C-alpha cells in the first residue's frame, strides 16, 4: 500500500478473492489447508526439538565413554605399576622389598578408587545412548507425521484444482493419520 492509501490488486489476487467469496468449496479447502499447514509447522518444531535432544544425548554418551576410557587407562597404568612393584618385591629383600610391598598396597588402593568411577561413567554413557535412541525414535515419528501432513496439503491443493471429492476425503484421511502419528510421538516425549 502506498502512502496515500491507494493500492492496486494484481489480476491473480482479484481472482483469488473472487473465488473465495463466490466459491465456498474452495474457501473450505483453503481453510483446511491453512489448518494442516499450522499443524505441520508445530510437528516440524517438535521433530526438530527431539532430533536436537537425540544429538545432545549422543554427545553426552560420547563424553562419558571417553571419560570412562580415560579411567580404564588410568586403572591399567596402576595395574602395570603394581605388577612392576610386585616383581621388585619378589626380586629384592629387606628394606627394598618392604618399599616395593608398600607400593603394591598403594597401587591396589588407587585401583580400588578408580574402578567404581570407571563403571559409573560407563553406565552414564549407556543411559545417555539409550536416551538418544529413544529421542531419535520419537523424531522419526514426527518426521513421518510431517511427511503425511505435507501429502495432505498437496492433496488439498489438487482438490481445489480438480474439485474431486475423493481427493478431499483422501486429504482428510491422510491428515488424520498424521495426527495419530503425531499424537503417538507426543505421548513419548
Image (cartoon, helix red, strand yellow):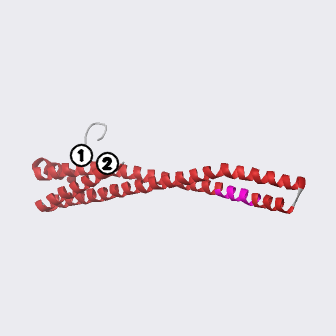
Residue 73 located within the stretch drawn in magenta:
yes
The label on residue 188 is none
Quarter of the N terminus within the rendering: top left
Chief secondary structure of the magenta span?
A: helix
Q: Residue at x 89, y 52 (%)?
A: 95
Q: Secondary structure at mark 2?
A: helix
Q: Is residue 99 left or right of residue 30?
A: right
The label on residue 8 is 1
Extreme top residue here?
Answer: 4
Residue 34 located within the stretch drawn in magenta:
no
Q: Residue at x 28, y 36 (%)?
A: 4
Q: Is residue 42 left or right of residue 15?
A: right
Q: Is residue 163 left or right of residue 92?
A: left
Q: Place residue 89 in its image quadrant.
A: bottom right
Q: Nearer the viewer, residue 67 or 26?
A: 67
Write the start and end of the magenta stretch as one range.
Answer: 72-81
Q: Residues within 10 Å of mark 1 (few under 14, many from 20)?
A: few
Amino acid at each position: 500500500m502506498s502512502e496515500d492509501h491507494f493500492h492496486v490488486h494484481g489480476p491473480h489476487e482479484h481472482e483469488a478473492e473472487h473465488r473465495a467469496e463466490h466459491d465456498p468449496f474452495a474457501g473450505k479447502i483453503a481453510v483446511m489447508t491453512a489448518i494442516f499447514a499450522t499443524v505441520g509447522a508445530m510437528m516440524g518444531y517438535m521433530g526438530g526439538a527431539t532430533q536436537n535432544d537425540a544429538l545432545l544425548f549422543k554427545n553426552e554418551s560420547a563424553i562419558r565413554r571417553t571419560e570412562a576410557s580415560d579411567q580404564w587407562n588410568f586403572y591399567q597404568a596402576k595395574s602395570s605399576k603394581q605388577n612392576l612393584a610386585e616383581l621388585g618385591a619378589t626380586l629384592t629383600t629387606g628394606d627394598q622389598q618392604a618399599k616395593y610391598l608398600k607400593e603394591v598396597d598403594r597401587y591396589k588402593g588407587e585401583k580400588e578408587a578408580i574402578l567404581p568411577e570407571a563403571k559409573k561413567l560407563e553406565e552414564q554413557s549407556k543411559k545417555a545412548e539409550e536416551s538418544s535412541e529413544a529421542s531419535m525414535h520419537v523424531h522419526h515419528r514426527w518426521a513421518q507425521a510431517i511427511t503425511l501432513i505435507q501429502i495432505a496439503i498437496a492433496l488439498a491443493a489438487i482438490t481445489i484444482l480438480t474439485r474431486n471429492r475423493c481427493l478431499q476425503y483422501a486429504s482428510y484421511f491422510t491428515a488424520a493419520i498424521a495426527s495419530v502419528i503425531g499424537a503417538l510421538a507426543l505421548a513419548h516425549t
